[in-house]
Image (spheres, rainbow, N blue to C red):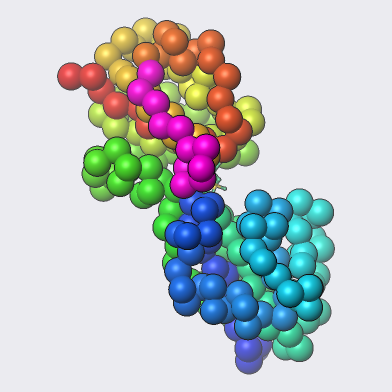
Amino acid sequence: MKNKYPVFILGMGPGNPKFILPETLELINKSDALIGGKRHLEDLEQNGLKDLIFVEDGLDGAVSFIKKYSQKKMISVLVSGDPGFYSLTNFLMKKCPEIYFEILPGISSMTYLFSKLGMLWHDALIVSLHGKSDVPMEKIIKSHKTVFLTDAVHTPGIIAKKVLSSKVSNKKMIVGENLSYENENIRYLNLEDAKDMEFENLNLVVLINET
Ligand SMILES: C[S@@+](CC[C@H](N)C(=O)[O-])C[C@H]1O[C@@H](n2cnc3c(N)ncnc32)[C@H](O)[C@@H]1O
């Protein structure tokens, strides 16, 4: 039987607190315990009365906390962007099938970037390289617009190198770093330039056909 009280999974938007939904802020304030990344938990002004569980300390700890306290404390899990778009939601639902999760949407880093670019995203191929080993190059080369979620291994430079090594020359790269924060940086780059550049860890890449 599922638990009586929900555990909330809250979409925190791209990062800057001004993009958090008012309803999400209300739930955060009401919660007894918050689970999330340091990036989100440290940006929130807390009164010190809540339990804070950092996911960087290990996901097993977060799962045990949820299983132990979900009926005693109001728990909210804070995830970046939208919870339904490559976040912890899938992992938590699989690890805690007995728990009823209530999800609140957030502005995804991807939709944020496309809005800033004045471009549509409904026709984009979406590729998450976060923690993945394979890059679907054939699909990427055929697609006129691809958006990549990156990680420390799959950097914009590595993506540029992979595309160039497939002898593709009609594509341009857009890199959005630290989206929504004060040091946000969105650049249009040639693949030849991008392949040797350094980037901020938090970035999204869009690859578009030049013609
Ligand atoms: C695990 S995914 C989470 C995606 C999230 N659920 C969303 O809707 O944006 C993390 C990846 O999203 C991208 N990302 C998240 N926030 C970002 C930001 N503020 N600026 C640039 N990229 C961001 C990065 O590619 C990062 O590696």
Residue 178, above or below 139:
below
Q: Residue at x 73, y 56 (%)?
A: 55
Q: Residue at x 45, y 59 (%)?
A: 19
- Quadrant placement of the N terminus: bottom right
* Residue 99, visible in the rendered structure: no
Q: Residue at x 60, y 33 (%)?
A: 201
Left or right, residue 184 beside residue 30: left
Residue 126, above or below 50:
above
Q: Residue at x 48, y 38 (%)?
A: 184
In the rendered image, the residue lying farthest to the left is: 211
Magenta segment boundaries in residue numbering: 179-189
44 vs 90, nearest the viewer? 44
Residue 91, above or below 93:
above
Left or right, residue 37 beside residue 11: right
Q: Position of residue 65 (x, y in %)?
A: 79, 72
72 vs 200, nearest the viewer? 200
Numbered marks: total: 0
55 vs 118, nearest the viewer? 118
Q: Position of residue 165 (x, y in %)?
A: 45, 9
Left or right, residue 17 beside residue 145: right
In the rendered image, the residue lying farthest to the bottom is: 4
16 vs 57, nearest the viewer? 16
Q: Position of residue 22 (x, y in %)?
A: 46, 73
* Residue 120, visible in the rendered structure: yes
- Residue 104 highlighted magenta (yes or no): no
- Quadrant placement of the C terminus: top left
Q: Position of residue 138 (x, y in %)?
A: 38, 24
Left or right, residue 55 beside residue 155: right
- Residue 181 highlighted magenta (yes or no): yes
